[in-house]
Structures are given as structure tokens and as C-alpha cells.
Image (cartoon, rainbow, N blue to C red):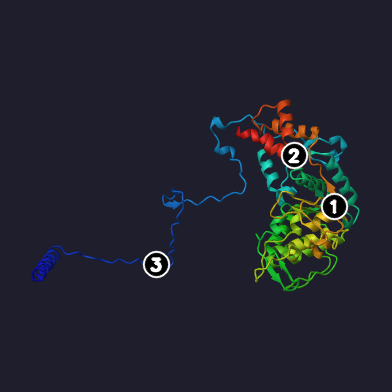
Amino acid sequence: MLTLSVRCQRVSCQLLASSSTSTLAQTRSYATQPKKGQIVKQASQGFKGKKNTPSGQMEHAKKDKKMMAFQPLPVSQLPHPLFESDRPDTLALQSFHPEMLTRVAESQALKFPHNENDPFRIFGLPRNILVEFRLLSKPCSVIRSVTIDAINKLDAASDKNSKESRVVLTGPQGCGKSYLLLQALQYCNARDWLVLYIPRATNLVNSTTAHTYDMRTRTYSQPIFAYQTLQRFLKVNALRLEQLRTQTEIEIERRPPVPPGTPLVDLINIGLKDQGHAPTVLGAVLEEIGKQTIFPMLLAVDDFQALYCKSHYRDQHFSAIKSYHLSMPRLLLEYASGQKSFARGAVFGALSMGNTTFPLPLELREALSLEHDRPYGPYVKRQPELVEYAHGLERLAVPGSLSVPEAASVFEVWMKDRAVPSKPNDELFLTKYSEASGNARAFVWKGLLSSMSA
């Protein structure tokens, strides 16, 4: 014990001696406060490096926004001769015009006109059609026999109430229902109809837009989607809406009522100025359009079966909200069921048979007299509200396979546009047509475009 204490004393003495010879100066620094009026920017941490600004200062590069669908690079960014292509700028096709849509034009490819206010450019497109139009140099489609049938129905509906023209396009997956609905939309727009197009009705029930409870209507309003619909509807139909005026007084919360004789454009602008009024204004605009007889009205809805499916929205108790308790699906269902109607016009819908998230419900399947894909019977529960909304719908069957002349036109479009690197010949056409069993989507994606990966 004595030796241990002596050693400890020696170590302590050595430490004191070293600290006296070399002292360690410990300092503490504080962040300087910014001066008044000085803005302090916090550096953003990104994956990209810094770039030089014109003033010589270093600035962090912003992250690029992710695009849901790819877009081609501009020509200015591809100056190297390696990127030069002999692909034609546009397809040498005739334009999609109402006078050309006769039986003579069957199995013929027509290009859609390039206008800034085209309905499919403003309202949008289903994803599969959007990608195909990006691959082709010019948006186009092939006129089929069922296209002429749909146009004949629209011509008959131009002078009838929309209750008598509520058509649903049916058929197997990939048979071309969305293309047929797009052709009907373009035809009505060229015929001076008022058109409202919902390309993806699944967005109304998949809980991707905000919803609030409206105590006045006891439904859940969707102000953002209603605002976007009003904005697009006005841009596409601006010239026609300027000629229409309200016929009755319209009451809107927290503002004076809209008197009769007000231009419909002014009524729409009320909903565009205040997003909270957009659902009420949209319903009022469609009701006023339903009373006038100057212009026919087409309401076209793709993914039509989603309006009858269970929504992904939840209330404050985390209980599922019915689709007909949401303002936008309820509004569309009222016109699809005939509870509300247009004095002149039609309601067209297209089913999406490949959507497993929102499959075709039993109530709609029985209303359209379609084959059942699962066991059913009188003891299977059916919702009375959906049965009422599906009552009276007319079915227009789209053939499940393309005819040989129709498939030949599709093949010719993709080969002339040089979107497919394969060398065109009869053997390639018959091989891809047989592999797809004539199915339109499979013929393009699993047939022609599959050669791009070879």
C-alpha cells in the first residue's frame, strides 16, 4: 500500500509539471447574429453539386422534378450527328374530321388536329394512350366499325334528352374502349358540342385529392378537383360558353345570389376565384347547361366503373366513405343514372376491365348484362343506391379483336413513323397479329413494341 501511494504521488507531480510547461487554451465560439434586414439562407443538401452563378457566387443546384411520363429531349440538346435521325416529323395521314367518319373510312388511320384547346390536351389522357402518343410523331387513331356505330348514336342524341343516351363501352381488356371514347370526344368537339372529359375517374375515389365535409349537402366536397374541372372545361368550351346565360337565380354560400341572365363564364369565374365555391359552381353550371338547347352536351368518363366502387377515402372515424357520398362521383352518377340530364346530349362511359384496385362491381355488371367473373346469386348483397345509379344504362360492346384491315392500318402507322426498328414485312405482321390474338393493346405493346428490346 505504501509503494502504491508513492507511485500515485509521482504521477500527479508529473502531470502538474507538464500542465505548467504547456498550457492548453480552450476557447468557445458563438454564432454571430444576423444584422437587421439581412436574410440568411440555409444551404440545401442535394445529390447534385454546386454550380456557378453569373455573379461568381456558388449556389446549390435544385433537384429535378420527377415526371410521371417520359418526355423527349429537345433538339437543341442533341447537336451531335450521332443523334440525327431520318424519322419524319409528322405522319402523312388525313386529319380527323367529322365529314370523313363514314363507312368508307373504316380501317383507315386519321391524325388528330393539333390545336392548343383540343380536349385531350386540356383534360388529359389515360396513361397508356399518353405513352403511345409520346412515341408517335403525331397523335392518331384507326377508324373501326364500332367507331361509326358510336358516332351514329351521338348524331341521334344531338336532338334528344341525355336520359335516352347513356352509353357504356364494354369489352375485354385492351380492346380499344378508351380510344373509342377519345374518338367520340373529338367528334363532338368538332361538331360544336360542349364537352366534359374525365380521363381517369379513379382519381375521384382513390383519396388523392382533398375532401371536406359539407353540412349543407351532407356530402364530402372535393374543391381542388372541382376547381381543376371548371378551369379545363372553360378553356375547352370558352367560345360556346360565352353565348350562354343563366336562366334561374343561383344561390352560393357567403356571397350574394347570382341573378338570371348572368353569363356562364362569369358564373364559372366565381368558382375559379374561390376554390371553396368550386363544387357548388360546377353543379350549377351543369344544371344551367342542361336547360339550354343551343349546344348539345357530351359527358365522357373513362374508368367508369370506379364511380361504383368502394372509395379509399376515410371519415373522422376511419370508416370508408361511399363513392356516392363524394361530391364529384355523386355529380357524375346523377347524370349517368338519369336523375339529372341535359336537354340535348349524351353520357358516355368506358370500363377498365384490367383495373384490379377498382374492379367492375356486381350492380353495374348486372345492369349491363355482362358475364359474371365470380360466384353470384340472390343472397349476394347488393347496394340499392348503386343499383339505382346503374339503372337504364345502355351497353355498346367493343369487339375484342381487331379485324385484319384494322390491324394492318395500326401496323402501317407504327412502321411508317419508324417507331419500331424492325423491318416491315407480311411475316412480321401476321406473327404479331397471331401472338396478340387480334387484341389491340397486346398487338402494339407485346407485339410491335416488344421488338425494341431485341
Mark 1 or mark 3: name the one nearer the start of the chain.
Answer: 3
Direction from residue 175 to residue 33 in the image, left or right: left
- Residue 415 placed where, x, y %? 70, 31
**Closer to the camera in the image, 282 or 325:** 325
- Residue 116 placed where, x, y %? 71, 47
Query: Amino acid type of disc 3?
Result: Lys
Query: Amino acid type of disc 2?
Result: Ala
Q: Which residue is mark 1?
A: 369
Q: Which residue is mark 2?
A: 440
Q: Which residue is mark 3?
A: 35
CA distance separating discs 2 and 3: 68 Å
At 83% from the left edge and 64% from the top edge, which residue is drawn?
A: 246
- Residue 379 placed where, x, y %? 81, 62
| Figure disc tally | 3
CA distance separating discs 1 and 3: 75 Å
**Is label 2 in a helix, a strand or a loop?**
helix
**Location of residue 171 with respect to 324 vertically, above or below:** above
Disc 1 to disc 2: CB gap under 8 Å: no
